[in-house]
Image: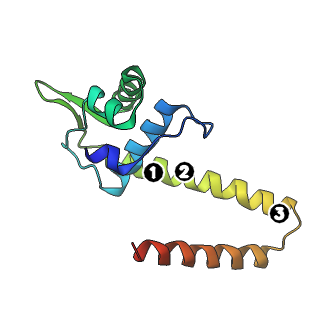
Amino acid sequence: MLCAMLFHVDARNGLAVYEQIVRHMKFAVAAGALRSGELVPSVRELARDLAINPNTVARAYRQLQDEGVLESVRGMGLAVTAAARRPCQNERAKLIRSRLRQVLEEAQRSGLAADEVAQMVHAETAAVWKKEKGR
């Protein structure tokens, strides 16, 4: 199924599995991999594909519904809402900025100069995007 191909969960990464599902779904919506009106896998399908408890998927889906990312489509299942993309993009940017800030603060505390960190960021950015193009 589409969503299972888009992400995987790791029970050991420190983030609750249902939160990983929520985050991955939002990132998929933000990136356009899941579009407005597109149906997401059923709770059972996604739980089977990810080898996790269906209650965990149900909890993630409830949260996504509460946040306006998913909506129930009578007789069909759950679909991405028409207004979901922009808030998902904003949340993705906020999370990335927060994580980047943590890394930059750690670099500063460790005594690295701003220009050293900028060079590292530039080099790593180029390496990641080059790697992505090679896929």
Q: Earlier in the sequence, mark 3 or mark 1?
A: 1
Residue lying at 33% horizontally and 49% vertically, measured from the top left: 5
**Secondary structure state at the residue bearing disc 2:** helix
Q: Which one is closest to the eye, mark 2 or mark 3?
A: 3
In the rendered image, which quarter contains the N terminus?
Answer: top left
Percent position (x, y) of residue 102? Answer: 71, 53
Q: Nearer the viewer, residue 92 or 39?
A: 39
Q: 59 or 84: which is nearer to us?
A: 59
Q: Write the residue at 86% across / 59% down.
A: 109
Q: Are marks 2 and 1 in contact (CB under 8 Å)?
A: yes
Q: Tell me if 60 is positioned left or right of 85 in this view.
A: right
User: Dot 3 corresponds to which residue?
Assistant: 108
Q: Secondary structure at mark 1?
A: helix
Q: Image check: 54 left or right of 94?
A: left
Give the residue at mark 2.
94
Which quadrant of the view contains residue 107?
bottom right
The span from disc 2 to disc 1 (Cα, nearest Å) is 6 Å
Q: Position of residue 92 (x, y in %)?
A: 48, 51
